[in-house]
Every structure is written in C-alpha cells, then in structure tokens.
Amino acid sequence: MTSERSSLLERRRQSNYNSLGDFPELPSTGDIRRINNSNNISAPATLLSPGYPSTPSIRDDRHGRFKLFNKRLGSYDEDRQGLIKENTGLRVWYESYSTIDWIHEIIKEGVRTRKLREAPGWRGRWEKAIDASQAWILVIMTGVVVALIAWFIDVVQEWMSDLKSGYCTTNWRYNSNFCCWGKEEHESCPEWRTWPEVFDTKTESGSYHISMLMYTVLGLLMSLIASLMVVWSAEKVVARAPPSKTISKPSTPVVSSRKLEDHKQPKLQTKTAYYSAGSGIPEVKVILAGFVIKGFLGIKNLFVKSIGMIFSTSSGLNCGKEGPFVHFACSVANILCRLFDKYNKNESKRREVLSASAAAGVAVAFGAPIGGVLFSLEEVSYYFPIKTMIRSYCCAMMAAVVLKIMDPFGTGKIVLFQVRYDKEYHLFELLPFLLTGVFAGCFGAFTSYYNIKYQHIRKNTFIKKYPVTEVLAIMIVTAVVSYWNPFARMGLNEFVANLFSECSEKDNNGGLCADDVSEIPRLLYLLLTTLVIKMCLTMVTFGCRVPGGIFLPGLIIGACTGRVIGLIMQYLTVTYPTAWPFTACAEDIAARGECVIPGVYAMVGAAASLTGVTRTTVSLVVIMFELTYSLTYAVPIMIAVMVAKWVSDAMFIEGIYDLLIDLQTYPYLDARREYVHTLTIQDLTEHNHATIDIDKLNTVGKLCEKLEDIAAMGYSEDGGFPILSNEGKYLEGYIASSELLHALNLLCRYFDNNPYPMTEQERNNVPCYFRRSDQDNSLLLETEENPILCLIPSNTTADTVDTENHSRPPLNDFSIYVDQAPLTINLNASMELLMEMFVKLGARYVCLTKTNGQYLGIIHKRTLLAYLKTLEEGAEE
C-alpha cells in the first residue's frame, strides 16, 4: 500500500498538477463517493456538465472576455500560501481591458522578497545577487535590442525615402547620401540616376511630371503596404461604452429571479482595434497607469509596427517615426520580461521596466538619452520611483551608445538633424524668440485640437469602414498639394535637418539659404505655404491606419514658424544695420556677413510647437540641448517653451495624447489634474451593487446570474462583489469577477472529460463557499487515490482538510480568491481623500462603510471617471 501510494504521488509530481489552472487527464470512467454528514443525510452529488447551457458568462464568448477559460492557463500567483497568509487572495492572469491590482502586486513582491531574504548561506547570497541583477540585465538587453531595431529602421527608411526620386547605379542598396559619398551638394553625382534620367526625359516639363508620377506611384505603393499590414494585424474587441455624463445609481437586484434557461443574451457590439496604427504613446501611457491591453506590446505588433513604419514614413505621408520608437521599445521590454518570472508574473514590476524602455525609445529617436529619461518621467510614466529613473538612464545610455557605434547615417550622428551652434545670441533677439514661442505654440495646439476633431469625424462616419482607402486618398492629396513646393515634398528628416542647419558657402540647406536679401521674400512665401500644407496634412494624417507619430510633423510646424521669423530678423538686421537695436550686429556682420542664424529660430520654434502639441516642457528643453550639443541657447529655448505652454493651455487644456486617451475612452486617471468637486462620496456610491452574502447558500447558478448582472452594468473587466455577513450588513471581503469566473471555470474544466447523467437543477445547485470558517460545507475535494472528487461531510473546512491525503484546496472553496482586507473609506471622508486612494494607490474600487464597519455600497473607478468627465465638460463650458 505504501509503495502504491508513493507511485501515485510521483505520477502527480510529474504531471505538474500543483499549479493553479493546470489539470491532470481524468480517467474515462469514475465514481463519486457520497460521504454522509453528521445528520446521516447524503449530500447531493451536484457537478457541472460541460454542456451546461445556463451559464452563458462561462460557456460562451459573447462578452469577448467571459470565455470558457482564461487564455493563459498557468499559475500567475506562485506563492499561494504566502499570499493567502497576507489575506490578499490569489489573482489570475489579467484579462484585456482590465486594470491591474497595484496593491496586490506590491504585496506579492513583498512576500517574494521576504522569502528570498530568508534563504541562508552562500546559496541565499547567490540567489539574492541573481535577483538583483535581473533588472539590469533586462534594461541593458532592451537598450541593445532597441538600438539594433532603430538602426535597421533608419537605414532602410532613408533608402526607401530616396527611392522615390531615383536609385544608385553602383549599388542598389545605397541611398543618395552613400551613393554620392564625399561630394558636395552643388557637385553633380552621375552614380545617382533620377527617374527622369531613367526615362530619358529631356524637357523640363516632362522631367517634372515624370518625377511627380514616380513620387506619387511609389508613395501609394508604400502607403498601401503599410495600411494593409495594420489592417491585417487588427483585432476585434468588444466596444466599451464611454463614461456616462450623468451619475446614476444602478438598481440591479442582488440575485435575479429569472430562470437561467430563459435568460436572453444581450448583443454587444464589437469594434476593430488597430494596435499598430498611430504612435502608440497614448496606449503606452494607459498601460503604464495599470491598464491591460493584450497584444499591444506583443511580438506580432512589434513586427508590424517596425516594418509598417518604414513604409509609411518613406511613402511621403506626413508622419514621423519618433513616436512609434517609444511603442516598439516598450514592446521589446515587454517581450524580454518573459525571461524572468519576477517581472513576467508581477505587472507592477513589469511596468517599471516598460518605463525604462520608453526612455530608450526617445534616446534613439532624438539622440537624447537624458531627455528620454525626463520624457518618460514627465509624459509617459504613471509610477516612477528613483530606482526606475536609474534604470531608465541605463537603458537609454545603452541604446544611444549602440546606435552611435552602428552609425546608421554614416555621419557619426545618432539622428539626421543633429546640429551644432557656436554663436552667441544678442539680447534684442529675446523678443523674437518669445514671439516664436507664441506663434509656434499656438500653431501646435491648433493642429492637435483639429486633428482630434477630424478623428472624431473618422470614428463616427463611414470613413472608419474604409481605412485603406482613406490612407490612399490622403497619400494622393499629399502628393498633389506638396510636390509643387520643393520644401513640402522634401523628406521630413531631411527637411528638419535643413531647417535647423546654419547656412554656409558649401551647404545651401536644400535652398533654404538666401544669398541675397532680395531672395528672402521668395523663401518666406515658400515656407509659409509649406507651413499651411504641413498643418493641414498633419490634421488628417495623424491617426490614420498606418504606423506614424506626430513628433516630426510637430517639429516641422514649429521649425517653419521659427525659420520664417528668423528670415524676417535677418532681413531687418541686414537692411537696417544702423537702426536701434541692430547696431549691436555691426561686429557680427563684418566678421560673418550675418547677425542672426535662422536655423536657431527654427530650433526654438520646433521646441515650442512640440510643447503646444504634447504639453511637455522640461524634457523637450533637454532634448533640444542634446540635439545642439550646447547650452548656448538654453535661455531662448526655455523662454519659448514656457510661453508656448501658457498659450496652448489658454487655448486648449489637454495635449494630443490626453485627447486621444479621451477619444478611445480608456480608463486613465490623470494624477496631474485638479478638480473642484461638486458631489460627495455618498453621491458616487452604488448602494444596490450586486453582493455575495456568505450566510446564505451561494450556488453556481446564482453566481452565474451575478456575473451576468455585473456584466450588464459594464463592469465585466474590473468588476467584483463585496462579500457580506450578518444578513448583509458587514463587509467581510471582496472577490473580483475575473477570479470568480476563473474559479467557476475550474469546475467546468475539471468535469469536461467526465460527463455525468445529472439534471439541470442538480448542476445549478453546486454550493460554493467564500470563507474558510464555514461550518456546513459540502466541499468538492480531490483525493490522492484517484483524481476524482468526493463530498466532505459537514464541520469539515478547508483549514481542517488532511493535507497528507489531499494536495490542494476544495474546488468549490473560493476563499483563496477573496481579498479579506478590501479598501474601505468612511462615509464622512472627503472627496479629496477618495481621489488620493484612486490616484496614489491605483485602486479599482473602494467600499463605503459606516464608522461601525457596516457596509453601505461601493465606488468603482469607472463611476469616478464618469464623474470627473462631467466636471471637465462643465469647466470647459
């Protein structure tokens, strides 16, 4: 008997059965042991049938999330006993469009750390060293991989962008710069053949039309490929209703009286989510704030985003690759987190690495590692402790160093538009710098606001049904309105580099330099028309179904504005050299032939415009410092950015990323916003929210009805049930709907291979328990002799089960999922305290109680967001 018992135990270990969610193969036949209780009454053998039609939340897929089983079957919380002792309960893998439990993740990390510190001797020291090094290994690997991908994108994108004008005859892989290496801009390059030369077009008119035709055809082909890749990678998700503008208290009953078989399934609408389109920064922001979007940071999306971005930015569409760099950098970090369970199975720790990777994305986009760290802190991250800042610095440093070694442009620069200024500015230039900040900030805010207006039109009209057609139409419009202007048809990276550069005898900056004062009016006309074209194209292009960001278009809008003001100042200083205050320019004009550098104004305007678009300040200033290799123009850039911030905030409060988050109705709670509250905590409380009374019999049928009720209220992802006692008066705990669904699915899954002839009523009456101190349980328990279930007599609890004979808790004991210390707030507390609990603690819910602990209701994050949305709309009016 002993040897047989040992053999069974060994087979159980080999089957890897102790992880929550893993199941052994059941025998084809089995029996149910009926063990009588103390009253000598046989307990009902009530099991779930795999064909159970009365639990639509469990058995069907109409909700998109309520499925037969979670996608990931492995264990999420490994140290089950430690978490149960902490009274926080176990958690399952988070479903898409849900919010992580920050408090649980922090407690979970604390349990793991304490267990690690208790390891004695040299083995313990080695484990601690390995654990401490995992974060550094992750950020270093992330920085290296991000730099390699950025190098590939930069090289291929430059080649494909130049392909619209011609190709290299000596080596087809070379772009125009490498093909004509060592030659000045004014020198001819026979190695590079333009398309008019290929088609042997001899007239000027014919050359223009051939060039425009090839520009348009190749642009259409590239944009078509980019949009098709995005559409191919799109996913169908359940459409979530936006937050209601009015706060109403639901009247959902605790348990519906209708029969399950008579339940009519509501039809939920689905929408197409194009995860690869756009910049991805708004989604990264909400993910770092605790939101879960499955697949957004996955391998498939990383591939489509990287390759599609090459085609979209090379096609001539008015979009940049700098914003998507942040997205694919976070994707790389998310994928690498799977190497270590410390980060793979703790969403809070994972987000620390994602914040660090966002800094690497900015570092390779602008060649600004310090600016990347500050951008991650200021714009992207929600939770940014000191250790995350140091790791962000390491990740950004590694990315910048590796990309510097790879040298994608052959110039020794990380990005194409890095420049260097060595001339001091004059005091009288502070006024035009200030005006540059005013106009550039105004244009940036104006562009972002009307881009959101157009995206509203796209979302609510027939345009959303034809994403590929829309992209092709935008490409045709771009070619028609841009090609006649030599500046507008120029590649975005090349155009920004020319706008920022200082004029010289050898470099004409693509025609932006004026050899004589008389040429300045013509340049002003071309630049102003380019500014209008770029603003209009950005309004309709950003957000269409191709990968692309708004960083570079925003830079160009501000750079054109700054260059125009710089040219005006150059004209005034040269034309009126003796007028006050231009007399200070006499020495510069004598030595250099000019007093002001229009490229500097372009740099200042670019920073101001990006501030108007995104509302970021400090990080943009530092990025501009790193782009210019100098602090000479620190004060002008700081003045322009600050003025742009004031002007844009006066026009429209929110930046482009916050507006996009609102457009997509993501549950993002901005910690930087301040509100003047008009309601009290009791006004937001849902007093009739579905609850579970542990003093009553809770069967599977009733629990399924509760899940249906909470799904109908719109809380299927982040909802849950307060657990009450003493006739529903006092709060005992809280169980999330995802954990309850998972526990019920365990029962269904276990009996899939064991059909039993049972009536529907018997299947409905399987009892479930939510505390380990119940005194009248019929616990479904697995035995070691056979992998089947038996019924335990009354007065037997999960705490008193013989651990030598039973390796896991009863399947209908749901107490292991119950959070026995739920977040509560007193009814007399202020709204400010409630806000702090949701913002600082990352709470998904807060229960309202009286001073004596009596339960009054619950406040969900969704309700709070609806209320805050009402406040924002009232403030705008």
Image (tube, helix red, strand yellow):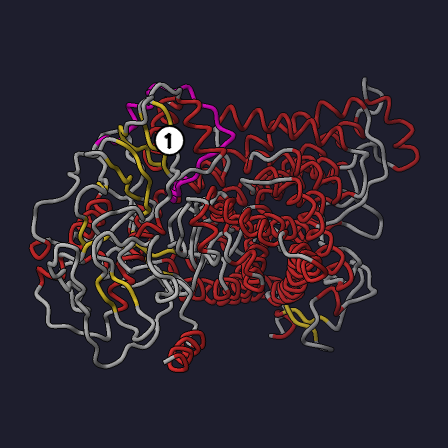
Amino acid type at circle 1 is: Thr
The x and y percentages for residue 374 are 66, 40
Q: Position of residue 788 (x, y in %)?
A: 26, 71
Decide if residue 784 is in sight here.
yes
The image shows residue 263 at horizontal and vertical percentages of: 10, 53
Q: Main secondary structure of the magenta part?
A: loop
- Part of the protein shown in magenta: 662-687
* Quadrant assignment, res 127: bottom right
Residue 618 sits above or below residue 355 on the image: above
Q: Describe residue 545's horizontal placement relative to residue 250 as left or right.
A: right
The residue positioned 37% from the left and 60% from the top of the image is 469
Front in this rendered view, residue 85 or 563: 85
The stretch drawn in magenta includes residue 682: yes
Q: Nearer the viewer, residue 531 or 104?
A: 104
- In the rendered image, which residue does mark 1 sit on? 824
Label 1: which secondary element: strand
Residue 121 lies, with reference to residue 838, above or below; the image says: below
- Quadrant of the image for the C terminus? top left
Check the image and report above or below for 156 versus 832: below
Tell whether 857 sits left or right of 150: left
Q: Quadrant of residue 645?
A: top right
Number of numbered discs visible in the structure rendering: 1
* Residue 473, horizontal then vertical, whole percent: 41, 57
Q: Which residue occupies 55% across, 30% down?
A: 442
- The residue shown at (25%, 68%) is 789
